[in-house]
Image (spheres, coloured by chain):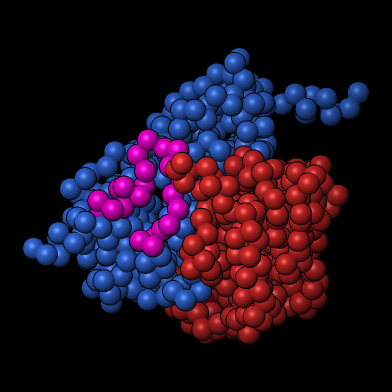
Chain colours: A red, B blue
Amino acid sequence: MNSKPQSDRRGRVTLVGAGPGDPELMTLKAVRTLASADVILFDNLVAPEILDFARREARTMLVGKSGHGPSCRQDDINALMVRLATSGKHVVRLKGGDPMVFGRAGEEISACRAAGIPVEVIPGVTAAQGAAARLCASLTHRDHARRLQYVTGHDRSGALPDLDWTSLADPFVTTVVYMPARTLAALAAKAIEAGLDPATPAVAVARATRPDEEVVVATMATLPALVADRSPPGPVLVMIGRAMAEAALDTHVSTNEKASARAAMTAAISAVQRAKAK
Amino acid sequence: MNSKPQSDRRGRVTLVGAGPGDPELMTLKAVRTLASADVILFDNLVAPEILDFARREARTMLVGKSGHGPSCRQDDINALMVRLATSGKHVVRLKGGDPMVFGRAGEEISACRAAGIPVEVIPGVTAAQGAAARLCASLTHRDHARRLQYVTGHDRSGALPDLDWTSLADPFVTTVVYMPARTLAALAAKAIEAGLDPATPAVAVARATRPDEEVVVATMATLPALVADRSPPGPVLVMIGRAMAEAALDTHVSTNEKASARAAMTAAISAVQRAKAK
């Protein structure tokens, strides 16, 4: 008797990136893995239709949003994940975007490793990549950007983190800020103080690639007030940099959606013009 | 008679991200789009199996690698793409990774817009995201990184570009360098000169997520010589930062591949130890 069969029956954890929102932006591997899971632990950042890829017999459990929750909550998720895998289940931890980009995968991988649970990761398209594609605005347009950076808009307590402001002020960077809804005005002020041109194009996208996507095209100086006015529900990301000037030139947005990004952009551009005229 | 039917018959261009290499890491939307293309213009960074998703009747054309080619070559690709779309074809421009992350999508989108050709973009998982998933090393581990940045390892002429070296020296950043094979030693020297700790973990990955993936785990000081020794064929990316220390702890790498990353990593770690012992 060898230990192989037993090892094959052992539980395991797969962290799966659900992509930016549109279920069609999931990878083939993510879909295949979801279809083989016994239990799926998901965030409320994951679009509901994505759970349709699960087997009928799979158990699905909402384990709260990524973002501002207290850290004990993450500990609870880790403990649940490990307990289920230890009992022999294939646990899928399903996360919006890519688990490895501001998705707390590090903590979940560590918990699995500490418990001796095999863990695997399936990457996903980030919300920023989804938004850039929709806007036809390259994140690294050769004429405008030689660096692309992702930062988070809040620390563990929900406050503005201590970012490397000089790196945000670089005129040749595209900066993607994750979920800055409550800290955007302070972030813009700090970046401008560090030398960022207030006229730098800045785009906010709520619920990127979802049918109810909302887009606001503005500048670093004008975006915070525009976003505060709308206070869009759901996750928001902000993309800052000269490369985002291309977003306003967008000539093609799929029209198969309820609210087209085009209309939202036109409205946003008008709003910026009205704000300027005041 | 309205213009709708004619407009539906018009040619168009879709820029499609092929993902990092493993065909299973393509998105559902990318696969569906490939299956509807009349012509596919692809780079040699795209894995051959990915073209199996094309229709049998589709024409596939290799249009050279992304990377070091002279810029007239890009103009030729733009002209070919526009000519085919103008003749009514659905042209798919298939690129490794994500077209919007160092994929020259900006130039191709501009060419389409200038010619009045409808253009759409389908994002893809980048090589760095694929590599991070394989290594179970989060790009933004909360204990190690508060910023993630992508830079390119060469400019239009193939030389080391003038990067924001201070932003690379930040101890709380993970830096992904695209295709630095020929410039890695100079890049490491500049980053260390700007203040980067030479002991910062650094990982090189060649042909990420492919069956013949090669991984070298080292430090910023030791990596350039190790990579030069191996001179791996195909695209190489380098990931630098404290978060990459987790890569060496990897407990799970799929064993369904010809050459496991685990073996490559073990060999690399031994090589680092031998280099240190000298």
- Image quadrant holding the C terminus of chain A, namely bottom right
| In this picture, residue A55 sits left or right of residue B274 | right
**Residue A209, above or below B240:** above
Q: Check the image and report above or below for A18 versus A277.
A: above
The residue lying at 81 percent from left, 42 percent from top is A256
Q: Nearer the viewer, residue B55 or A93?
A: A93
Total marks in image: 0
**Which residue does the image show at 45% across and 38% down from the upper left?**
B256
Q: Is residue A34 above or below residue A81?
A: above
Q: Residue B108 at what x, y percent from top left?
A: 53, 40
Residue B42 against residue B174 in the figure, above or below: above
Kindly give the residue lying farthest to the front in the view shown. Answer: A1
Residue lying at 15% horizontally and 65% vertically, measured from the top left:
B276
The outermost residue toward the right is B1
x and y, in percent, of residue A224 in the image: 69, 76
Task: Decide whether residue B267 is among the magenta residues.
Answer: yes
Magenta stretch: give its range.
B247-268
* Closer to the camera in the image, B278 or B145: B278
- How far across and down, in percent of the image, does residue B222 sit? 21, 62
Query: Residue A238 occupies which quadrant of the picture?
Result: bottom right
Judged left or right of residue A177, residue A195 is: left
List the single residue furthest toward the left: B278
Is A29 contained in the magenta span? Answer: no
Where residue B97 appears, as percent x and y from the top left, is 49, 44
For this rendering, which residue is in front, A75 or A31? A75
Asked if one can make out residue B213 in the rendered structure from this viewpoint, the answer is yes
Report the residue at 63% width, 45% height from top.
A33
User: Does any portion of residue B75 appear in the rendered image?
Assistant: no
